[in-house]
Amino acid sequence: MKKLLKKITPFISIIFFGFALWYLDQELQNYQFSEITAQLSEIPNLHIGVSLFLSFLSYILLTGYDALGVEYIGEDLEVGKIIRAGYVGYAFSHNMGMALLTGGSIRYRIYSAWGFSGMQVTQIVGFSAFTLWIGFCAVGGLALLFATPSLPGDVVVPFVSLRVLGIVLLVMVVGYVWASAVVKKELSYRDWSFTFPHLGLSLKQVAIASVDWLLAASVLYVLLPGGEISFFSFVGIFLLAQIAGLFSQVPGGLGVFESVMLLYLSNFLPASQVLGILVVYRIIYYILPLLVALIVLGYQEYQVNRQAVHKLGEKATNWVPRVVPQVLSFSVFIGGAILLFSGAVPSEVPRMQWLQHFVPLPVIEMSHFLASIIGAALLVLAGALQRRVDAAYHLTVGLLVFGVLFSLLKGGDYEEASILAVMLVALLFCKKEFHRKAPLFSGQYSARWLTMIFIVLLSAVWLGAFAYQHVEYQSDLWWEFTLAGDAPRYLRATVAALGFAVIVGLVKLLRPGRPHTLAAANEIELAEQVIERDDRVLSNLALLGDKKLLFSDSRRSFIMYRRERRSWIALGDPVGPSEEAEELIWQFYELCTGEQMTPVYYQVGSDYMDIYMDLGLTFFKIGEEGRVDLESFEEASLDSDLYRNYRRLEEAGYEWELVPPGKTKSYLPVLKTISGENLQDQKRKEAGFSVGRFDERYLLHFPIALVRKKGKLVGFSNILRSGNGQELSTDLLRYRSAEPHSIIDFMILNTMRWGHQHGYKWFNLGMAPFSGRDEDYASPGWKKLTNFVFTYGENLYGYRSIRAYKQKFHPQWEPRYLVCKAGWTLPGTLSNLSKVVSGGLVNPVSGKIGGYSLKQKKKQESGR
């Protein structure tokens, strides 16, 4: 049901937007386009100045929502940083809609750069959204109860009176404040939990959000002629219009908000005047803040990348100051819309008369025609720019150059030419950020992106139809070429733009989709060939057969992943050549989003962290992986108890033998018995996914180390090896219940000795969960949480024992991360991940060595 609702949401947006255009068209039938544009100059400059000032105050107050959210999670942050994050987030969410998915995702990127964990950012964004609604209920309730607006007689609402709705809203606010004072315990529902803020914080929410809504309404109210409408009656209708725009899912409520306001205000003012005022309001409260937000976000990206270089050192030298591709993509989309809207409205007569002295009429006609096609092309290319496709970058640069030229040649439109020129300069400085060699139409366009394209095209068609509604249609218009022939030019250009969009849509629709995997009988064999050339032992877990494999086009690399409900969880970084990693990460991300699934990258390193961040994902440090340098390995350098355990078993007659893969099959029956006895003794089950399990087909791929005592098999471990002699590790470490637990030390040390003798560089000890907690990325709150888990989780999982045991080998530690979307999907993602790894983030590899619980070892040894 949820999946179906998500699919039909864009169609709901289109229906709402189409209805809004129909209503606007009906209301404006008796007006001409020139009348509306003339109304723009009738608004006093003083009123515009006051409106600009109130808009500025409203956005400053909006950032107070984030300040309350930071206080709610118990963190401290500089006021300047809070204003920066909140302002940018709300500027984008106001224009693009879906506040939690647009402005929220931008704030995830900003806050994570300041050290906040994904869960903390989710709490801040959620609390801010809740604050907005509390203010809406408070202001709306008061306005509807004490200054009930009069609706037109043909408008029906599902209440006896709007006052009833006002009472309901006020009861909700009072109930929330009362609960904040009384309810102290955490409330939980499935994967969600909520704790009411203290009474002082809840009162701040109501106060700040209420004042903000009043300021937002004032921005529009001061543009209206004085004396016609009371302010508080206006506030009620303003809030209803805002809520209608929000629920329509149309970006920025475009058209829907205007329709509701026009329905009410046309009782007092001419429709043409109302629409002109609404255009000015949208520029002041939406467009101008967005332009400022682009500049602020560019500065923020510069700060983020400069700090990342300082923190990550050489691994981050490729993080250069840049504006994120998502922002440039949205800017190019706006540029395409500008070209289409410009082609749909009449040209300035004085400019055309001046232009005819320098430019022949055929050039003017052709420029107008091509400018509209370029506008449609930019809408499409903006989506590919977001995916960093280099072909899209070069095409966009070329089209912007011609867009600037044609804007000047078709009507002397220097305003839009200047805007396009700024976009062009920004793209030229960011060339290195668009380096993917992917096909132009390789990725799936989201339903929301396609909806935005459709809405822009529909708006351009309606705008032209309204502008030329008094021009009687004749078939001769298609072939009329005159200097004053704006209507014929609009017809030709619109059909060309729509035709281009249809052709691109058909190409995308008929293009065969990428298969989920190269699922075939030879997929394991193909993966084995890739693993033989990979430098990390984790890649061997692809041979378990419990994961799907997504191969690169060259079949020289792959990503292994498991599907769990709405999450597709990739294990580790891509396996294969590093030059193919970025494209494969993108392919997996696009595969997930195309299927409306949540991409998750589990237990990844820091090598490709910039790529994951470019996808708009956030990361959680889940531990550190320990590796022992075998080139300088000396047994004397180990802790004394390790070497003492090893010598004791050697003297007791224990022998270690490595059997090559081709000769292991005959041993599997007795090894299965040993494995089953070991699992039963430790009261646990096989895990899989990110750690090996006893599976005969899996074990046949590896050499197996056998441990004998007086000729009897008492233990074994399979050996994972990477290509080029880079790394090896023990996987399963199984032994009979009668044997001492120090047999683990015996098996590991013998494996390290063998690796040292055969030229391997590293021995991988696996991950120590929640270790390395002083990492710069961690926020104060995240550090407190991991310190708490690391300290008090000892009784349950033995986190300290795991770290302490592995530290005896004196390894080099490298961080490991969980990378995923940090939004409302995060709790579900963590739940799905916990199911996949059979025990949460600490079970596979991280909390065990070779499938053996160090916590169990500690308890058993302490009892002897």
Image: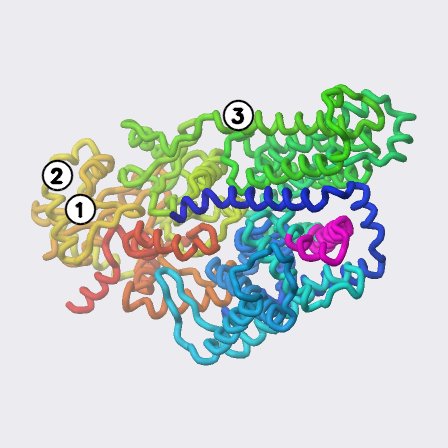
Q: Quadrant of the C terminus?
A: bottom left
Mark 3 element type:
helix
How far is mark 3 from mark 2, CA to CA? 56 Å
Residue 615, above or below 662: below
Query: At x 34% / y 43%, what residue is drawn?
Result: 563
Label 1 sits on what residue type?
Answer: Phe
Work out whether mark 3 precedes mark 2 in sequence or the reverse, and give the earlier one: 3
Label 2 sits on what residue type?
Answer: Tyr
The residue to which callout 3 is attached is 507
Q: Position of residue 432 (x, y in %)?
A: 62, 37
Q: How is the image coloured?
A: rainbow
The residue to which callout 2 is attached is 667
Per the rendered image, the range of residues in magenta is: 260-289
Tell me where residue 131 sits by quadrant: bottom right
Q: Position of residue 128 (x, y in %)?
A: 55, 64
Q: Is residue 333 left or right of residue 554?
A: right
The residue to which callout 1 is attached is 716
Query: At x 15% / y 48%, what residue is drawn?
Result: 675
